[in-house]
Amino acid sequence: MEHAPKAIDVTNDVEMRTFNFFTMGIDGHPFGLHLDMAIPTILNNADEEQRKDWLPKAANREFIATYAQTEMGHGTNLKKLETTATYDPKTQEFVLNSPTITSTKWWPGNLGKSSNYAVVMAQLYTQGKCYGAHPFFVQLRDLNTHKPLKGITVGDIGPKFGLTTTDNGFLQFDHVRTPRRSMFMKHAKVLPDGRYVPPVHDKLNYSTMVFIRAAIVSGMAYHLLVTSTIAVRYSAIRRQGEITPGAGEVKVLDYQTQQHRIFPQIARGLAFRLSGQYIMKLYTQTMDDIRNGDISAVPDLHALSCGLKAVTTHHAALGLEQCRMACGGHGYSQASGFPLHYSVAVGACTYEGENMVMLLQTARHLMKMAKAIRSGQSPKSNKIVDYLFQKGPPKCLIDQAYDTNYRNVLESFEHLARRQTLEVYYKLVQLQQQGRSYEQAWNDCAVELCKASRAHVRTFLARTFVEEIDKVSDLSIKSVLQDLLQLYLYYEVTECATGLLEDGFMTGQQLKYAKKKIYEALEKIRPNAVSIVDSFDFHDRDLHSVLGRRDGNVYENLLKWAQSSPLNKTDVLPFHHKYLGKMMEEARQRSKI
Amino acid sequence: MEHAPKAIDVTNDVEMRTFNFFTMGIDGHPFGLHLDMAIPTILNNADEEQRKDWLPKAANREFIATYAQTEMGHGTNLKKLETTATYDPKTQEFVLNSPTITSTKWWPGNLGKSSNYAVVMAQLYTQGKCYGAHPFFVQLRDLNTHKPLKGITVGDIGPKFGLTTTDNGFLQFDHVRTPRRSMFMKHAKVLPDGRYVPPVHDKLNYSTMVFIRAAIVSGMAYHLLVTSTIAVRYSAIRRQGEITPGAGEVKVLDYQTQQHRIFPQIARGLAFRLSGQYIMKLYTQTMDDIRNGDISAVPDLHALSCGLKAVTTHHAALGLEQCRMACGGHGYSQASGFPLHYSVAVGACTYEGENMVMLLQTARHLMKMAKAIRSGQSPKSNKIVDYLFQKGPPKCLIDQAYDTNYRNVLESFEHLARRQTLEVYYKLVQLQQQGRSYEQAWNDCAVELCKASRAHVRTFLARTFVEEIDKVSDLSIKSVLQDLLQLYLYYEVTECATGLLEDGFMTGQQLKYAKKKIYEALEKIRPNAVSIVDSFDFHDRDLHSVLGRRDGNVYENLLKWAQSSPLNKTDVLPFHHKYLGKMMEEARQRSKI
């Protein structure tokens, strides 16, 4: 970490994120949040003077800071945070307080034991009025003794599903005083006399979230590609059963069921990677636009990023488990690496915006689009949503031979997203006409709204995948990527087939065609599968897996791994004779009587 | 465990299994396999004399035995086990040997440290010929010192995804001699001179597997009902967001998306429970039939039990994770209990027959049925498969008002299972006509074969659920159960809608009807949800969950739970000043220079 400034521009959040990803391991680090969240907050929310004071110290690791937003009783809903920061103009200090148990800050990584500072989100009160949640930079522990400062209770929240090396923590304030200037003042301010100065515009918060979610999409790609690497390699080692009688046991990778479990995960991993990169580019571009005062692209991008985060984390979690189960019993051992990867990756379904909430965020935007369509507005020149404004073909054409660049498949996804969006919009209008409030109607349609969001995201992922593969110029690489693309697209067609069939858009024959294309793609990918995952060039260190070792010496090393388990230090456990041994000995004595 | 003989009939495997389930906890026990596998093997495979010798000692716990079948390189495929037991008529002993690394016994629970005996499956060689895998009762460790006997290497296989309290182990034999009579001789025998006496019939092994798989189905019901209890209770405590503006934050259980995540898990849990009980009854009945020489029911039952195991374990795993994620961040904490339940339950997707292998087992039987149908055979009088031989309605009728007892829904499931079975059968025939061998054709159809099996299992689960609810006489209970049944059936309709739509059997309008019935059921269940899960009467000890506590004091106890974490014994970790403290101190010194 000391070398970060030599390797990258530490004030560039994209570079910083990438650097951390490669140096920190996958289940956390004592100053992971310091680098991932606290420094970016200083960069984006501190005013010039604060930045000058805090940034060099942060970069030099004179302190370790974390980001404390979530409370025990309040996750996604920022408005309802209970921690208060009340300004006292007499001393020019804020008084931080945790009025209830549920207001206890809960979950921040590295808060439990490592950090001595935190960015704390608290409801700002001044001159008797609440101005909503604002960030404050607060010292938590003494710099020398590391003991919590007076009025501060802080500790670890205990073991979790994964992320075992991260000290997620809790934090309570009992009327803790902190200087006025500990409030981040780049945007909003509180003047010495207590007057509140609001920020110029509030869209900037959204862009930070877009950044984090784009990073999550790429993270999911990483997890999927890593775990499918393990699964493919092991399936090329493991032999079981015969296909041609007498020809000997085959590699399990030769089974269609095994290919059908693993290969779609490679294809999805690639799709997520390409979309993650694309969204990150859009983010950078949008940040430039914002600096030039143009925030028009933010809503479409923000809405898409929410849904993308939900869909990719959900599919990654399912895919990881399929890769694990495809490795049978050994997949269940920690030696496989899968339990580690799964328990870390699946956290992303929940953090940075719970998936259902995310899908409904996307749906809010889709409903705005539907309203615009109904009122005859023309589309913005924006690749993310403009297909919604267009009229697609009346019937699916995916089995037509002239389908260059999968236009017919993409149009099918677009059709579904458009129809589902408009259908649920009409339903919302109808329910309100029947007397439901907008919010009640919204809740009654929530499951269908989520479906619209998923369809919208599927359209984006597929389009990006097609466009990016189209750009590849090396023909031999392109050919392999096209096999994966074929698998991806037709796999997604079968996944959303109900929606395509139910209005008669697609026929049963066309679905059969899509399935045939899947099985055909599996066969084409099989001979290249090991080379494909080798080409991702993961180091054994990335895989954390005996099963996925590059050298293929699985069984020998599985035995070595087991033998090195602490339980095998002695043949007989030290407490054996005290319990089980005694039990058996006494039983034997009894039976001799 | 000492009290088992007072409470139950320890020679009855159903009673034993139930007793173990309630006394052993969910992630294992040092003599879990002794009770679950070793004693049943003695009961079913030892001859009279062996049984007299071994059973009382086993029941008294004079030794701890486990069941060692799986090898490092060989899981499901029994035929390929590599461990050998070669009979030596000179000394009247078997010589047990592990000829390769992959022949190392791997995974048996309690093998690592606790057991001093094991039932070992090994290839029996006598008079120069191999007779396949047979069970042997082998001493592994010295009764007094507990050290491994000469020629035996045994140890723990290291940490796993879950089951942390079970010492899964490995075992290698280096030409270990064991008396002739250590071979289980109820069925097959080896005479002193080395002659092999084969068993009378070999269907009995199947029935043991039926028993274990029926127990797994009930186990999955348990896990689903436990975790949905936690999710429902917590969702009735947790408040977030407003539905009616100004009316305050609502319980998250009021959100349709939340209901749609959790309630189907309750419904599936019930369906699995009813089917698990039903299959266990069939098993007991079939065992009686076998004793009377009638094995005709075994194939249908065995095939069904394979598919049921695969479907219920898969759906339970998905459902458990949905319950966990429905509880947001706190669901990811070990305090929720979910990580424990998931990591234990999901193991069942792999053990006792990997799920894909299981589905293909069921499919083998379905293909036999398809062949019988095509050759004009009449159905056996057997509720499990006879629907396949019948002609159902040409069109789906699920939106017809006269649908008493969901006859139309069940007929839809039957239609799909029948069609998918016959379609894949024709495909198999067609591929063979095109020159593929049966085995190659089978592999080319494997994914579609699995679909047929799932459809067959769905039909059984739904029919059993409908029939069992029909028997309930208490009308107020019946009414609540019918809401869950409604949700279950229409949820399953939407899950298999692609298959029902693709051949024009169901219309899009009918699918809309099914969805409407789902949302209607969610609304009906909501007010009763807490009472429903309370009625399962789980003890807090079953739940292992702060979130699911019966008393509802979630937040207070979450804080207490966290504070009791070992990391919180001291405010400052003992090694803080050695590493992080030093790093910050040095950085501060540097910046002062």
Image (cartoon, coloured by chain):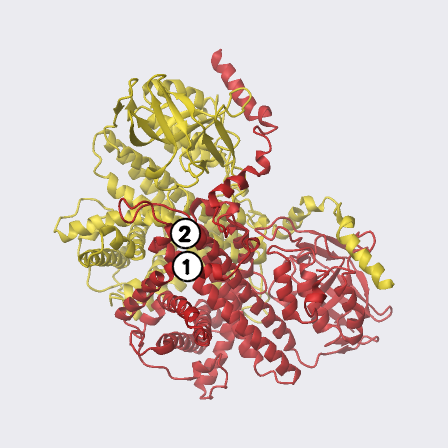
Chain colours: A yellow, B red
Residue at (79% x, 72% y) in the render? B52
Circle 2 chain: B
Q: Which residue is mark 1?
A: B529
In the picture, the disc for residue B236 is 2
Inspect the image, locate mark 2, and give the three-letter code of the amino acid beneath it.
Ala
Residue B125 at x, y percent in the picture: 75, 70
Please give left or right for residue A246 compared with residue B308 in the image: right
Asked if marks 1 and 2 touch (Cβ < 8 Å), the reply is: yes
Number of on-image labels: 2
Q: Quadrant of residue B305?
A: bottom right
Question: In the picture shown, does residue B185 fall above or below B69?
Answer: below
Please give left or right for residue A565 compared with residue A356 in the image: right
Front residue (pair A532, B91): B91
Alpha carbon of mark 1 to alpha carbon of mark 2: how far? 9 Å
Residue B493 at x, y percent in the picture: 36, 68
Say what secondary structure mark 1 lies in: helix
Decide: few, some or many residues near mark 1? Use Cα within 10 Å; few <14, some 14-19, many ≥20: many
Residue B373 at x, y percent in the picture: 45, 84
Inspect the image, locate mark 1, and give the three-letter code of the amino acid beneath it.
Ala
Decide: few, some or many residues near mark 2? Use Cα within 10 Å; few <14, some 14-19, many ≥20: some
Please give left or right for residue B91 compared with residue A560 in the image: right
